[in-house]
Amino acid sequence: RLRQDLNLPPDAFVVAMVARADPVKNHEMLFEAAVSLRSPAMYFVLCGKDIVPENPRFVRFVGDNYIMEHFRFLGERRDVDRLLNACDCAVLCSTAEAFPVVLGEAMATGLPCISTNVGDAAWIIGDTGKIVESGDTRGLVRELLALRAIGQKDIESLRKEARSRIGEYFSCKRCQAQILTIYGSLLDAKKQAFPSR
């Protein structure tokens, strides 16, 4: 239904990028990759604060007919989970990150991800998606084409692996256990440093 609402062809390969309009998120890398691709079957759905075609940083790209036809600029959304479920993969092009939660959110919905090699991105994705170096537009193009080219059976397998990885490594239960372990080790260290008299 969301694809229909966004006027996306039923057979389109839809790429999501959920990130505010901030230079560190490097949307320009995705625009450059898209212009290089010029794939008639690939569409891009972007959302986040100030993600509008009138954004001064985007203007020089938005004038391109391919960008106008194949990009959807949705601004801030409260239904990001629904949006991700309507897509085929998620992309993060940042030049810097710490722990990019958006990758975990995309993977939790069963989306394979392609991300730049920033922060904990490679650890989050593992072998369920692809990592390219920051600014490597050709690498991004290559990985997008490769992901679009794989068969339905393989894409379903990647979807399951992405969701499974988030559940295995980043569930609330596991994170709680890790935090308790850290606190426990700190308490043990304190007891050793300051033994009871």
Image (cartoon, rainbow, N blue to C red):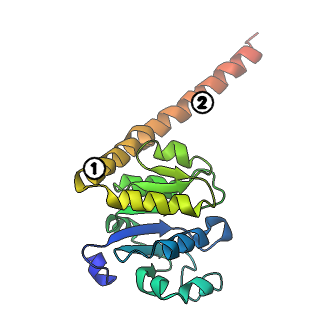
Give the residue type at disc 2.
Answer: Ile
The answer to whether one can see residue 113 in this image is yes
Residue at x 69%, y 20% (from the top left corner): 189
Q: Nearer the viewer, residue 13 or 2?
A: 13
Residue mark closest to the camera, 1 vs 2: 1
Asked if residue 66 lies left or right of residue 23, the reply is: left
Residue at x 63%, y 55% (from the top left corner): 97
Give me the disc on residue 75: none
Q: Nearer the viewer, residue 145 or 48?
A: 145
Residue at x 52%, y 87% (from the top left corner): 64
Residue density around tag 1, few if under 14, some if 14–19, many if 20 or more, within 10 Å? few
**Residue 34, image x and y in percent?**
49, 73
Q: In which quarter of the view is residue 13 placed?
A: bottom left
Residue density around tag 2, few if under 14, some if 14–19, many if 20 or more, within 10 Å? few
Task: Give the Cα separation between the discs numbered 1 and 2.
Answer: 38 Å
What element does badge 2 sit on?
helix
Which quadrant, please, contains the N terminus? bottom left
Pointer 1 or 2: first along the chain: 1
Q: In which quarter of the view is residue 44 placed?
A: bottom left
**Residue 192, image x and y in percent?**
72, 14
Disc 2 target residue? 182
What element does badge 1 sit on?
helix
Disc 1 target residue? 154
Q: Nearer the viewer, residue 153 or 80?
A: 153
**Residue 103, image x and y in percent?**
48, 55
Asked if residue 176 lies left or right of residue 57, the reply is: left
Give the residue type at disc 1.
Answer: Asp
